[in-house]
Amino acid sequence: MADNSSLAIAKSGKKDEFYTQYADIEAEMNAYVEYNPDVFRDKTILLPCDDPEWSNFTKYFACNFERFGIKKLISTSYARGAGNKQLTLFEENSPLYDAKKHDTHGKLFTLTHDANGSGNIDTDDIEFLGYLEGDGDFRSEEVCKLRDEADIIITNPPFSQFGDFLAWIMEAKKSFIIISNQNAISLKDVFPLFKNNEIWLGQGFKGNVGYFIAPEYEDYAIAGQHKEGFIRVSGVMWVTNIDLGKRHEILQLDTMAHNLKYNKKLRKKLEEAGVPLEYPKYVNYDAIDVPFTECIPSDYDSLMGVPISFMYKYNPDQFEIVGISLEVAEPMKNVAKKGTFLQGGNRFYTTLLTASDRQNGYLYHREYDRILIRPKKGGNS
Ligand SMILES: C[S@@+](CC[C@H](N)C(=O)[O-])C[C@H]1O[C@@H](n2cnc3c(N)ncnc32)[C@H](O)[C@@H]1O
């Protein structure tokens, strides 16, 4: 899928069936281990949407079990996932295999020691402990028990249930590293967690685009971006509450005057709207609009609205998150000339009219969702 990838696209169950590449998991985990080499030491890690037959999360942590000093790896498989219809090698070779339970019951796997006595611990030491009572839904009592036993929860969960999945982790006060889509940041129950620095973005995917393994999935990516057997998901991100170096990098910024003189994107936007070359103020909120994160001015110390993608660069020592337009902006009523369609919604408006705004008779331009931020004293230096 190309730029139309979103939580909405993942709304149907089938859309949740795509799998994370080993290299993407490795790149992300490296960031935490680099920051704290003991981050996984003596920890019980739960992978709650992961059948070891095809989950690279299970493979990655099994391969690094000894190096990281992990105490226990628990991996559960959800019976209703598309892939789970197949008979896996883990079951086939196990005396616990039960054809009657195969399609309807989740599966439980653990890794704790060198089970086959080979001299090292790896994927061959993963043990199939049998079937769960239910289908392996993360909300079930038995998977909640496994969650409670774990120190860290790591996975790519079903995108369509991201809000519930995150709430499930937060209610148990667990550490976690999970994948989601950028659209999740502005969800009503998710944004406050970002705002209060209870959760943040991880290292991330290159260009915030991920390629996920999905041989039977229709990929809408344009020819130049298509990779056979994969779906392309834009705006994809890692979300976590475990610290990492990126979170402490200072975003390098230029002054307002510098940006207004040299930033081509900013100038183009202002010139096209035919407004003075200055940062626009919102019509319905007392803050300036910063349409591109790179244009956040280093010499402005009050409220600014920035794109949601700012979160990829957010350093809590540099900025304070004050709110989100969806919460603080009052819907505007008279944004169009009489007789034309009225735009609504809790959004910020500016006078940066586009050609389409003019065609529609709009008096103001409705900006995309914005995060309201304020620099911290001394944070930009
Ligand atoms: C995006 S896929 C990722 C799978 C795997 N974690 C990976 O990254 O390769 C999400 C998985 O969650 C499973 N799933 C869907 N609903 C679930 C639920 N309620 N409880 C547990 N797993 C679920 C799906 O079957 C699917 O395999």
Image (cartoon, helix red, strand yellow):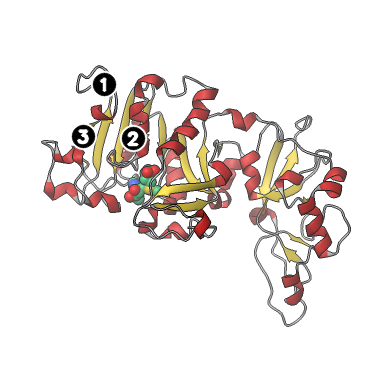
Which quarter of the image is occupied by the C terminus? Answer: top right
Q: Secondary structure at mark 3?
A: strand
Residue 235 to residue 55: above or below:
below
Residue type, mark 3 in image: Phe
Q: Which residue is mark 2?
A: 58
Determine whether, in the image, residue 11 is placed left or right of residue 194. Answer: left
Q: Which residue is mark 1?
A: 113
Q: Which residue is mark 3?
A: 128
Label of residue 130 in the image: none
Q: Dot 1: few (<14), some (14–19), or many (≥20) neighbours within 10 Å?
A: some
**Residue 359 lies in quadrant:** bottom right
Residue type, mark 1 in image: His
Which residue is painted at 28% across and 19% down in the image? 120
Task: Tell me: is circle 2 under 8 Å from ligand 1.
Answer: no
Q: Position of residue 179 (x, y in %)?
A: 47, 43
Determine whether, in the image, residue 237 is placed left or right of residue 309. Answer: left
Instruction: Determine contact: label 1, label 3, CB under 8 Å.
Output: no
> Gap between marks 2 and 1, in whole Å?
15 Å
Q: Position of residue 94 (x, y in %)?
A: 14, 36
Label 2 vs 3, first from the N-terminus: 2
Residue 147 shows in this picture? no
Determine whether, in the image, residue 178 is placed left or right of residue 192. Answer: left
> Gap between marks 1 and 3, in whole Å?
13 Å
Q: Secondary structure at mark 1?
A: loop
Residue type, mark 2 in image: Thr
Q: Residue furthest front?
A: 224
Which residue is painted at 19% across and 23% down in the image? 116
Determine whether, in the image, residue 318 is placed left or right of residue 88. Answer: right
Residue 232 shows in this picture? yes
